[in-house]
Image (tube, grey):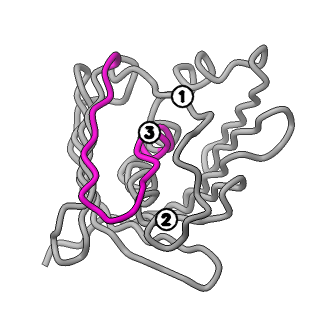
Amino acid sequence: MKRFFWLLLLLLPACSHLTDKIATTTDLQLLSPASGPAPQTLQNKVTFSQAAKQQTFIVLTEMRYQQTRVIVMTPTSQSILEMQYDGEHFHWQNRSQSPLPAKEILAMMQLALWPDNAIKKVYAADKGWTVSVTQQQRRLLRHGEPWVTMNQQAQQMTIEHHQHNYQLQIAPLEQD
């Protein structure tokens, strides 16, 4: 399940390749790697969909308590986005020809993978957020408006960004 969440966040760069309507700023917040899941490395296939357009990416995610590192690549292994976050400093390098919402991508990954209590601490009700978590779904609302919905089914995850009108489908990268 966690592998799918990371991939979803990485699919956001694909969104900017398909449309210029996606904002490069976000209201989503970055969470400390120290409050994240157990250290692990994930490899996922992420498909971005908006309107009738689709694009697929490979996302590699390395999570450690000291730092989170993400690499987004094309199916031909061309790196288009690299991100690192240590809880204080966010560094990113965009090799694509499009502006990418890098911070939003990482924040969405964290929403999918971080423990519920870490998410609820940052997205507090007194700041206008509502966080709803079940075994198969996470929803984030801002002032009652749907912001992000994540649905988990078996080995697949779907993330819908309601404000930017796109969807991500995340699945484990198959090893040949």
Rendered residue at 32%/28% (across/down): 90
Question: What's under tag 3, amino acid-wise?
Answer: Lys
Q: Was residue 9 drawn as part of the magenta stretch in this picture?
A: no
Residue that badge 1 annotates: 29
- The kind of secondary structure element at disc 2 is helix
134 lies left or right of 79:
right
Q: Amino acid at mark 1?
A: Gln
Magenta range is 87-108
The first of marks 3 and 1 along the sequence is 1
Q: Residues under labels 3 and 1: Cα distance?
A: 8 Å
Q: Secondary structure at mark 1?
A: loop
Pointer 2: what residue?
A: 15
Instruction: State the image coordinates of residue 101 (x, y, percent, origin top left).
Output: 46, 48
Residue 35 vertical placement versus 93 (above, below): above
- Residue at image coords 60%, 16%: 121
Residue occupying the point 83% across, 43% down: 145
Q: Earlier in the sequence, mark 1 or mark 2?
A: 2
> Total label count?
3
Using a 10 Å C-alpha cutoff, classify the residue at mark 2 as few (fewer than 14 neighbours), some (14 to 19) or many (20 or more): many
Give the residue number, with chain letter if any, for mark 3.
103
Q: Position of residue 114 (x, y in %)?
A: 46, 32
Q: Residue furthest bottom?
A: 52
Q: Where residue 161 sits: x, y (%)?
A: 64, 55
Q: CA distance from mark 2 to mark 3?
A: 14 Å
Whether pointer 2 and pointer 3 mark residues with C-beta atoms closer than 8 Å, the reply is no
